[in-house]
Amino acid sequence: MKMWMLSLLLAGNTFAQPVETVHIKRDPAAAFPHVGKYYDGEIPVDLLGDPKGIQAGPDCHVVSFTISYSIEKIAVTGYQIPKYILQDIYRSALREMIFITDIKAVDENGQIIYLMPMHLIPVAHEE
């Protein structure tokens, strides 16, 4: 019995693997885009039109995204939600979830970064 336990202990040590260390060079918060300081959930509809548009970390700038609401799915170039989309959301998609996906940004080295999708619910001022 003792011999079996000793061989089991020795066998366990032969399978041990060195621990790999991973270093993250970029601020992990940069992967989470936001409009105003809204990352997810309800957002006042007027803030969707924030002139700063969709933002991420200080060293990355959004260059394109796709916005889906109601039955619309629109690819947008740039970081701002166009006014015609904001007007359409105000008319037909208040209190309905909108999805901002395929968010591409460029970092300070010119490399493309794909950011996490956003799920927002535009609400009117009174709510």
Image (cartoon, grey):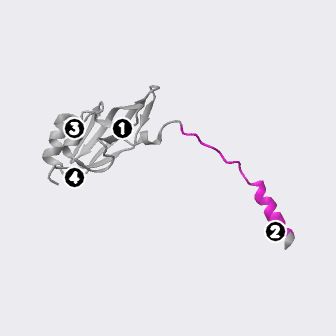
Residues at marks 1 and 3 touching, judged by CB atoms closer than 8 Å? no
- Which label lies toward us, 1 or 3? 3
Q: Say which of 59 and 96 sits in front.
A: 59
Q: What residue range appears in magenta?
A: 3-24
Image quadrant containing the N terminus: bottom right
Check disc 3 and give the amino acid type: Gly
Image quadrant containing the C terminus: bottom left
Q: Residue at x 47, y 39 (%)?
A: 27
Write down the quadrant of residue 84 in the picture.
top left
Disc on res. 103:
1
> Mark 3 or mark 4, which has the lower sequence index?
3
Q: Say which of 86 and 1 sits in front.
A: 86
Check disc 4 and give the amino acid type: Glu
Query: Mark 3 Cα within 10 Å, few/some/many (few <14, many 20+)?
Result: some
Query: Mark 2 Cα within 10 Å, few/some/many (few <14, many 20+)?
Result: few
- Which label lies toward us, 3 or 4? 3
The residues tagged by marks 2 and 4 sit, at their Cα atoms, a distance apart of 62 Å
Check disc 2 and give the amino acid type: Met
Q: Which residue is mark 4?
A: 96
Magenta stretch containing residue 112, yes or no? no
Badge 3 marks a residue whose secondary structure is helix
> Mark 1 or mark 2, which has the lower sequence index?
2
Q: Residue 96: horizontal and vertical position, in percent?
A: 22, 52
